[in-house]
Amino acid sequence: MSNNRREIPCLKGYYANTYGFIQKKVDYGYEFVPVHKRGKDYRGVYIEGQGYKVSRLIAITFPEICGSWFEGAEVDHINTIRTDDRAENLRVCTHADNQRNPLTRKHISESYNRRGTKQEKEPKKDTIAMYSRDMVFLRSFKNSNQAEKQTGIFRRGIVGCCNGTAKYAGKNGGDKYIFRYIVP
């Protein structure tokens, strides 16, 4: 598929291409509009203070590839990869048709058990060590669930500390601790 560039019907001076990028016409040519995360893993852009999903702009711009837009329509990512906004991967459909996508159905069924209730992901089995702020070992836990129950510190904070996205974890207004995975 060639990289067709076409003006977005509802946005003068802004262009979409079949590879899933949004560009703005400037004096010296075209420049890419910065992309950010929008909602659950979707790619979004801000144009003149208004936020848009990139997939929706691509689908509206290329109806011959994605299908004609209608009231209440949704954009389905055929391969279920929410960041893949190539025109050939998008289709305009109803919510029911979107849910009937075989790959979407597979992902949904894998997240529910036989009773129809949502399965919780298995907690990491790695042992976790708890340290004071000056790196004095305090104790260890079998997993993040046990650490949360015994310390009262939210699991998300403990895991974030173990993964390096947070420096410390602790209760609001309380002491802060350092958590690390222990490699056997």
Image (tube, grey):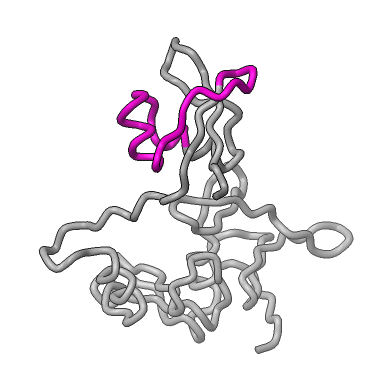
- Which of the two residues, 153 or 92, is positioned nearer the viewer here? 153
Whether residue 164 sits left or right of residue 118 in the image: it is right
Residue at the spot x=56%, y=37% of the render? 180
Residue at the spot x=34%, y=24% of the render? 152
Q: Is residue 2 above or below residue 158?
A: below
Magenta residues span: 132-158
Q: Position of residue 88 (x, y in %)?
A: 54, 83
Residue at the spot x=39%, y=36% of the render? 155
Residue farthest to the front, as pictured: 184
Q: Is residue 146 located in the magenta-colored stretch of the structure? A: yes
Q: Is residue 68 located in the magenta-colored stretch of the structure? A: no
Q: Position of residue 84 (x, y in %)?
A: 55, 71
Whether residue 149 sits left or right of residue 144 in the image: it is left
Question: How many discs mark residues in the rendered view?
Answer: 0
Q: Is residue 154 above or below residue 184?
A: above
Whether residue 121 sits left or right of residue 139 in the image: it is left
Q: Position of residue 5 (x, y in %)?
A: 69, 76
Q: Is residue 146 above or below residue 59?
A: above
Quarter occupied by residue 85: bottom right
- Which of the two residues, 100 or 48, is positioned nearer the viewer here? 100
Residue at the spot x=70%, y=87% of the render? 2
- Which of the two residues, 63 or 169, is positioned nearer the viewer here? 169
Quarter occupied by residue 156: top left
Q: Position of residue 27 (x, y in %)?
A: 86, 58
Residue farthest to the right, as pictured: 28
Q: Is residue 77 above or below residue 57?
A: below
